[in-house]
Image: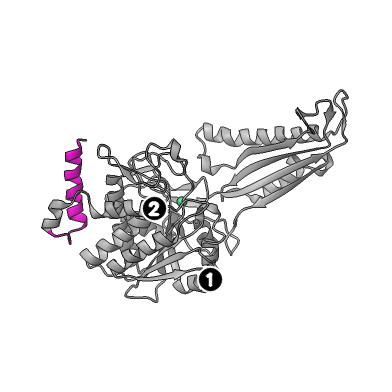
Amino acid sequence: MAATFRYLLLILTATLLASHVSSTQQQEVQEPEPITRYKQYLRFKTAHPNPNYTAPVSFLLTQAQSIGIQSKILEFVPNKLLLLLTWPGSNPSLPSILFNSHLDSVPAEPDKWAHPPFSAFHSPETGQIFARGAQDDKCISMQYLEAIRNLKLTKKFQPIRTIHVSYVPDEEIGAADGMAKFVESEEFRELNVGFVMDEGQASTNDDFRVFYADRAPWNLKIKAVGVPGHGSRMFDNSAMENLMKSVEMITRFRDTQFDLVKAGKAANSEVISVNPVYLKAGTPSPTGFVMNMQPSEAEAGFNIRLPPTADPDLLRKRIAEEWAPSMRNMTYEIIQLGPLRDYKGRPLMTLTNDSNPWWSVFKQAITAAGGKLAKPEILASTTDARFMRELGIPTLGFSPMSNTPILLHDHNEHLKDTVYLRGIEIYESVVSSLSSFVEASQ
Ligand SMILES: [Zn+2]
């Protein structure tokens, strides 16, 4: 699309989205205000290992003040700021709606990028805005606010349920000082949250993707011990032999899962993935390893991802009996990262059928905004949503990015301006529908 035409379109959208801008200002507008604000937010250096939380929080506070909604900074761990914004509903006794996103980003390697990762370079030809966090997840952080701004200031909308927006630290490093602390707090309990929207992922076609569960990560270490021996001698039960038998079995299991994906019978996120991540064995020598000696210890590490539909006890049994059996001189350690079941012992899944009234309202809100949802999915990785699902609070992962390459954590992460602006309209529909919904008992 020609640059001039594209900007005409953008200015038109700006007029629709920000009708409070005066006509003289409109003539000077080079780009819609929401795009300017999105780019400003993208420029904060929020990458680990030293994310700056102070500057983006103060920016968001200014935004909240200009919209006229309440704000509160929480600090469960020093310097790990958490911002909570609140738009009170007319019936605050009803459970509230929480829109969550994280403040932090993964690092970027600037030399592998076409534009500096925190410059928010905006291509005049394609409309793509390049920045670390453009998709994950600074887009939704700002879209929530823009939607609220339009609803409150322009459309004079009044929510029935109270709406909260949270900006949490440390999602990308496991959330121990972020969402994990927040959900345990009195402040969170007082919010009386009934339904949560959290981050999702881009879709490469016209549909929007929506996620009802995350996979749970496990780190598995298996270790074999055995009698050491001369490299020339064949004998049973060496550490290497025992470990390699296990590696073969794990590889066969991995194949059964991967075959389901390859045959199109299951999505990548619906199977148990097992991937080898390290091997540790051998007796070091100045030039490498001692070659005429069979070592007495050997170890391997695997990254495992369990969908909520998998039975964790069955996998534990398999590990104990087949992958690291004591009769083959093996031991193992499972490091489980995060919860597998909610407080009632149920798998961490949010129902996406009519038995969940929140789902129906959400789905209708997307349709009402002219959008289409893809079949609900399990997210292959992990987000903060697991903490809310553990409390039994229905939570959907959703980032309205259609026709967009999936670039989270990748080089040249970007989002197109028109896709971003469309997302604001989608959230206007979602925020107004969810906060107007009163029929559910909870
Ligand atoms: Zn994220």
- Crowdedness near tag 1: few (<14), some (14–19) or many (≥20) residues, C-alpha within 10 Å: few
- The outermost residue toward the front is 286
**Residue 37: percent from the left, percent from the top?**
30, 55
- In which quadrant of the rendered image does the C terminus lie? bottom left
Residue 13 is inside the magenta segment = yes
Residue 185's label in the rendered image is 1
Against 112, residue 56 (above or below) is below
Residue 328 visible: yes
- In which quadrant of the rendered image does the N terminus lie? top left
Foreground mark, 2 or 1, reads 2
> Alpha-carbon distance for marks 2 and 1?
25 Å
- The outermost residue toward the left is 24
- Crowdedness near tag 2: few (<14), some (14–19) or many (≥20) residues, C-alpha within 10 Å: many
Label the magenta part by its dominant secondary structure: helix
Give the magenta part as a residue range.
Answer: 2-22
**Residue 425: percent from the left, percent from the top?**
27, 54
Q: Is mark 1 within 8 Å of ligand 1?
A: no
Residue hosting label 2: 138
Residue contact at pointers 2 and 1, CB within 8 angstroms: no
Sequence order check, earlier mark of 2 and 1 = 2
Residue 53 is inside the magenta segment = no
